[in-house]
Image: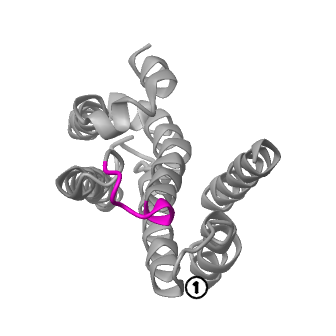
């Protein structure tokens, strides 16, 4: 019903906002992973009717993995106090996490397109709903991550290339482009 869909959308927004808040908090312990799985992940995928427990668990792990990559991509790059140079380990961690984020976006979209899940009438409704939820969480987590990497991208051209590569990935994939129009406008601006 209309009310149920509205409540579901509010729950999605609240859970992804909670995840974004946890991502920006300092630290990265097993408590973060637990929060992503049990608080945010179960909130995102718990409201999908007929979703088998095993599929729900896989979706929660995928969401937690995405949140962890976004958290790693958002870490600040420290500078050497005397010279002002960026610490190579921090730059390497950011480059690796951004590359991993791009890889995950690409592989998820390829698998969705190959299976033609969103366009198929044969796919179960819970499968379509879980994929839409994952794409929504990508929308809410990845775009702020890219915006947060604007300054590091200006400091290091390799980071800038990774950020542009991710934006291009979102732009070139119809699964993302059709669901992230406003976000793409913000990123391009």
Q: Nearer the viewer, residue 114 or 165?
A: 114
Q: Check disc 1 and report the residue beneath it.
A: 30
Of helix, strand and loop, which mostly describes the magenta segment? loop
For residue 131, side relative to residue 88 (left or right): right
**SS for callout 1:** helix
Q: Which residue is drawn at 51% across and 22% down?
A: 182
Front residue of this view, candidates 79 and 46: 46
Residue 125, x across and y down, in percent? 49, 60
Residue 17, horizontal then vertical, whole percent: 70, 51
Q: Give the tally of numbered discs.
A: 1
- Left or right of 152? Residue 34 is right
What's the residue at 31%, 50% (across, down)?
120
- The answer to whether residue 183 is above or below residue 57 is above
Q: In which quarter of the image is the C terminus?
A: top left
Q: In this view, does 152 lie above or below 107?
A: above
Residues shaded magenta: 120-127
Q: Does the magenta stretch include residue 125?
A: yes
Quarter assignment of residue 46: bottom right
Tell me which residue sits at (70%, 47%) in the image: 9
Residue drawn at x 51%, y 57% is 129
Q: In which quarter of the image is residue 21?
A: bottom right
Residue 117 shown left or right of residue 8 in the figure:
left
x and y percentages locating residue 76 in the rendered image: 49, 50
């Amino acid at each position: 019903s209309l009310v149920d869909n509205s409540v579901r959308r509010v729950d999605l927004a609240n859970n992804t906002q909670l995840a974004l808040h946890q991502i920006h908090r300092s630290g990265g312990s097993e408590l973060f992973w637990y929060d992503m799985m049990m608080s945010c992940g179960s909130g995102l995928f718990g409201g999908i009717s007929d979703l088998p427990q095993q599929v729900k668990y896989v979706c929660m792990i995928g969401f937690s993995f995405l949140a962890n990559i976004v958290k790693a991509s958002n870490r600040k790059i420290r500078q050497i106090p005397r010279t002002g140079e960026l610490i190579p380990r921090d730059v390497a961690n950011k480059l690796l996490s951004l590359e991993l984020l791009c890889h995950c976006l690409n592989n998820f979209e390829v698998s969705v397109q190959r299976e033609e899940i969103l366009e198929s009438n044969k796919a179960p409704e819970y499968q379509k709903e879980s994929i839409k939820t994952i794409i929504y969480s990508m929308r809410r987590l990845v775009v702020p991550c890219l915006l947060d990497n604007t300054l590091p991208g200006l400091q290091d051209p390799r980071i800038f290339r990774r950020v542009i590569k991710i934006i291009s990935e979102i732009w070139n994939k119809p699964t993302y482009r059709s669901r992230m129009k406003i976000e793409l406008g913000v990123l391009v601006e």
